[in-house]
Image (cartoon, helix red, strand yellow):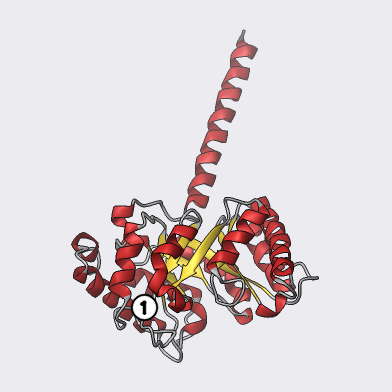
Amino acid sequence: MKNKLNSMTIFNRFSIFLVACFIWISAGTAKAQPKKINNDQLYFKKNLVAWCVVPFDSKKRSPEERAIMLKSLGFRSFAYDWRAKDLPSMETELAILKKYNIALKSVWFHIDGNSENLLDDTDETILSILQKTNTHTELWINFNPRYFKGSQEEKLQQAIKMIQYIHGRASAIGCTIALYSHGGWFGTPENQVAIIKGAGLPDTRIVYNFHHGHEDMDHFADVLSLLGPYLSTVSLNGMRAEGPQILSFGEGDREAGLLKTLKASGYAGSIAIIGHTENEDVQLALQRNLDGLKKILLQIGEKKAARTYK
């Protein structure tokens, strides 16, 4: 009887230990994905993602300096854009984000080369780091325009093959994928939806960028109807028919209407604020876009959302 009780005690302690480990692991990986929001909180500051930050910062901040800057601006979520010189510090970047409780929304994932290649060394490095650090996030996939060759059908099959492959690699390490609208054939909304359907991967998402969608402004509702089931993130930019392509939010003449249309569509994903400028402290660019967003929110009657911007 005594041995039986001892065995039960050991078993119970081991069960408690396993539960504790599960809770600890879950807590560690939960930061990888921002919390879901309701459509009525679409423009609340807590739903914003800082994007186009690392390569566009004239101050060349370190991972810790960058996290401190993002925290000071009130960002809870960050999408990691990079250049080859930044990847040696990527593992540090991920650790620092966790330290400052900033969720990693995504990692930029660029496919170079031609359709006969799979992934290059840079892509493999990113996957390796994500796996090593047990980081579960979204890969924002973009292709070099030279990747696609031939007819519409040939390009579609090339994209489907690669997206299926990347999806498998990402899923194996607990990550998801999203097609990034960066212009060109791959960035066309109709082509991106055709790729997802052709690949048979309904959990694949799409990232839509205002600054690559000037031609969509007059039929934005139709674009949203097409992309709606797949949209993960919408990236904001100041919008005027005549351009320029990159403009601070609130300095155009179409932003108010576009925000109204986006909200009316029922969209409830993330909103990205970009720091995409040249030779400027990226903090200034992000702050200018935040100020512009607050101004437009007040114009369209989103007072509750505007009050979250201090």
Residue 46 % position (x, y): 33, 60
x 34%, y 69%: residue? 258
Using the rendered view, name the quadrant where residue 270 is placed: bottom left
178 vs 217, left or right, is right
Outermost residue, top direction? 1
x 20%, y 71%: residue? 299
Q: Does residue 264 show up?
A: yes
101 vs 172, left or right, is left
211 vs 192, left or right, is left
Outermost residue, bottom direction? 279
The residue that label 1 is drawn on is 286
Residue 4 % position (x, y): 63, 12
Q: Residues within 10 Å of mark 1 (few under 14, many from 20)?
A: many
Q: Is residue 102 shown above or below 280?
A: above
Total marks in image: 1
Residue 47 % position (x, y): 36, 60
User: Which quarter of the image is occupied by the N terminus?
Assistant: top right
Residue 96 % position (x, y): 49, 66
x 20%, y 60%: residue? 304
Residue 19 or 117: which is nearer the viewer? Answer: 117
User: Which quarter of the image is occupied by the C terminus?
Assistant: bottom left
Q: Is residue 243 shown above or below 230?
A: below
Q: Does residue 272 show up?
A: no
Residue 172 or 240: which is nearer the viewer? Answer: 240
Residue 155 or 72: which is nearer the viewer? Answer: 155
Residue 65 or 56: which is nearer the viewer? Answer: 56
Mark 1 secondary-structure assignment: helix
Q: Amino acid at mark 1?
A: Leu
77 vs 289, left or right, is right
